[in-house]
Every structure is written in C-alpha cells, then in structure tokens.
Image: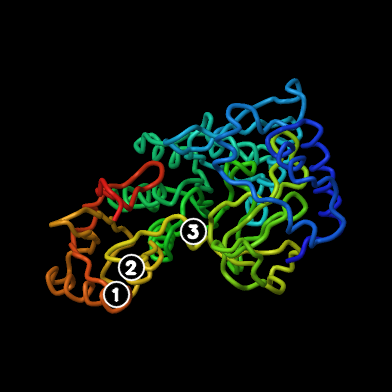
Amino acid sequence: MEINKTQLEQVNRQLARMMESDNFYGKRLKEAGVTQLSSPEDFTRLPFSEKQDLRDAYPLGLMACPEEEIVRIHSSSGTTGTPVIIPYTAKDVDDWGEMFKRCYEFAGITSRDRIQITPGYGLWTAGIGFQNGCEKLGAMAVPMGPGNTEKQIKMMIDLQSTVLCATSSYALLLAEEIEKRGIRDQIALKKGVIGSERWSAKMRERISSVLGIELYDIYGLTEIYGPGIGINCEHDTGMHYWDDYLYLEIVDPETGENVPDGEWGEIVITTLVKEGAPLIRFRTHDLSRIIPGECPCGSRFPRIDAISGRSDDMMKIKGVNVFPKQIEETLAVFPELSSEYQIRISYHDGKAVMRIYVETDGSNDFKELQRRVSDAFRSRIGFTAMIYVVELGFLPRSEKKTNRIIDERFTAE
C-alpha cells in the first residue's frame, strides 16, 4: 500500500523535527543527506530503524522534543540486553488513548461495559494502555494487573465484568480454572481483548468455547505507542490498523524490499504524528500481510492479517529451518491434542535433538498418538522430533506470556 500525499507531508514534518532535535535518527538523516521527500519512491530510500538502534540510543536518545514536554516514559518488556526507553508527550498519551478507544469500539465494547484489565502495569505499556483506552471510552475499568487468580475470579464474579483484557496465556489459565471450578454460569464475560503474544487457532477456540465469549486480537508494540494500534472487527477478516497515525509497509525480511499487497512479509512501521519518540521505517520483525479490498464492516481503515510469527523466531535443527507456526499447524490436525505445547532443543551425542511435549485429554492411547504425531512431523517438516504426549494441564500455564521454546544448547549448531 503506497504512501499517500497526506502521509508523505506528515513524514516530512517528522524528518524536520528529528533533524532539529538531532536525535539518533536525525543524525542518520544528516549523514545520508536526506532533508525532504517529494515522492513515494523517496520514502522507500529512507533507512530502516532497528531495535538495536533504539538500544544504542539509551536512555533518551530517541527524544525529538524538549524534555519539559515529556510526561511519561515506557520500556519494552524484554529481559535481556540494554532496555529501550520510549518517551511520550501529553499528545502522544492522548493519541494512544484515542487509538485504544477505537479498538474497543471496533470490538463492540461500549461505556456500559466493565473491563477487567489483567496485563501488567509499570514500565510495560500493556496495563496502562488498556486502562487509558477504557477511560477514553467511558467504560468501567477494573485494573487488576497480572496474577492472583483467586482474586481475579472473585472480582470477575462480584463485579460481573463483561470484558477480559489479557495475554492469551493468562486467558487460557483463567478459562481452565473457571472450567475446573464449574462456575461458568456465575461470570458475565461477553468479550475478550487478547494481545501481547501470538496464539494459535486451537488456543483461540479453547478460550472462546470454555468462557463462551467473542475474542478480539489486539496489536501493538512498545516502540510504537503500545497495544492498541490495530484490532480485528466482528467479521474477523484481519486487523484494522490506524493509518491516520501510522504508515505501515510489508517488506521481504531478507531484501528489505516492499512486497505487493496480499503477500507475506515483515511489518515495518512509521509513526506519522508521534512527538516524543517518532520512528521512521521501524522493522518490527512481526510477519503478516496487507489484506487487499474492503472489509465487510465497511470501515475505511486498512487491514493486516493476524501475526503469523516473527522473522527472528526461526529454529535450525539438523540443517532444517523450523518456525513455531509450522509446529502449531502440524499439531492442529490432531483434534485429540490441546493448544498447549512445549519445545525443548538440546544436544545428544553431538547432535541437535528437538523434544516436543503436547497435551491430550487422556482419552487416547498415548503411545499410538505419539507415533502418529511423530509421523506427521517427519512428513511435514522433514526431520524426526521426539514427541511426548502428556496429560491435559501437565505443561506450565503463565500469568504473562508462555515460553514455549526452551533452547538448551550452549553452542550454535
């Protein structure tokens, strides 16, 4: 989707601000001799920005406005390496709230809803983002934050919360706990707004069926405001994103070249009006595609497909490149299996070995099921994995994000 005239003018204003502030990207523009864009072709010549650039700018090298205009900072949720600090002006916070309000509205949520917010607060953008949008909408926020499942369920029942905001991992944990206690008839949930991690169709079906709710997939990342920059509507034909705040490209992860609408690639985002830390052509590493045509809902906002994975989450086993999505798709053909799995990669006798633990409800012959799943992996992916079928609930559940891949190798293959 080519950048339009209005967006190009907005980018030019951002470039001017960045060069004037001499922030990390302003310095890069000066080195490249870029001052103004006059065409979409000029835009594609702009250099990308990467997460490492943002780390190198620590702590406040991203700032593109006077410090007295900064009212808040947030930081990415990663636990390794130098953190990324994102400064926000009052307008940035307000714009983010408007985008999030729009997300709730696209999900059919109104000011009459009671929204239970379980993602974390603090430096992470999640909890406060959900709350900011909730308050913009005029709905009742129940700002629980993560954990304390006993209290979460009590408040859910006592306050008759109608909307659950959570990671897919915690939504599953809550769903299974409610099912185990047999208290589904005591809760009033109607919708779930789920974000922060990619989730399989099987996991979506389980959460939806156990809780009896409609699920909406919200998109965002700390570097680009936070969650709330896109969501699917009731027709579930992809996630609408807000092109009056963002310009979004899909590029080939290898070449960096734009791909045609409809083709899969890496999402690259440019912030059009962000003041505190504007970003130009930021490589997210999230894999999706622009969905051509109009949505049945009639919205003018363009759509991207659900995130299928990340360009950097590939595993190399015995010379074969493997993505988590391939594993999920292989498991999905077995109705006997739950949505939960765990991958452990280690060395045995000098060779890489992949062990995959998958859950079933116990109504099947475990050994026979293991054999069939192993055959499916060998046929689809091209190598033999060690499959372990375990009882439902055996694998750990998380109140935040689930770590499904544990690489126990100490040296690169």
- Image coordinates of residue 79 in percent, x first then y, are 42, 36
Q: Residues within 10 Å of mark 2 (few under 14, many from 20)?
A: few
Q: What numbered label is drawn on residue 113?
A: none
Q: Nearer the viewer, residue 10 or 227?
A: 10
User: For the residues carrying marks 2 and 1, which lies nearer the camera in this image?
Assistant: 2
Place of residue 159 in the rendered image (x, y in percent of width and height, measured from the top left):
49, 38
Mark 3: few, some, or many residues within 10 Å (few <14, many ≥20)? some
Q: Which amino acid type corresponds to the residue marked 2 in the rendered image?
A: Val
* Rendering coords of residue 109 (x, y %): 63, 51
Taking 17 as reference, is 242 above or below it?
Answer: below
Whether tag 2 and tag 1 are in contact, CB under 8 A, the answer is yes
For mark 2, what is the residue?
A: 320
Residue ID at (25%, 55%): 345
| Quadrant for the N terminus in the image | bottom right
**Mark 2 vs mark 3, CA separation in Å:** 15 Å
Alpha carbon distance from label 2 to label 1: 7 Å
Amino acid at circle 3: Ser
Relative horizontal placement of residue 200, taking residue 319 as reference (left or right): right
Q: Residue at x 53, y 48 (%)?
A: 163
Is residue 355 in sight in this rendering? no
Identify whether 94 is placed above or below 354. above
In the foreground, 293 or 397: 293
Q: For residue 192, say whether it is visible.
A: yes
Residue 207 placement, left or right of 88: left
Q: Which residue is mark 3?
A: 311
Closer to the N terminus: mark 3 or mark 1?
3
Camera-side residue of 369 and 105: 369
| Circles 2 and 3: CB atoms closer than 8 Å | no
Question: In the picture, residue 391 is in which quadrant?
Answer: bottom left
Residue 221 placement: quadrant:
top right
Q: Amino acid at mark 1?
A: Gly
Residue 382: mark: 1
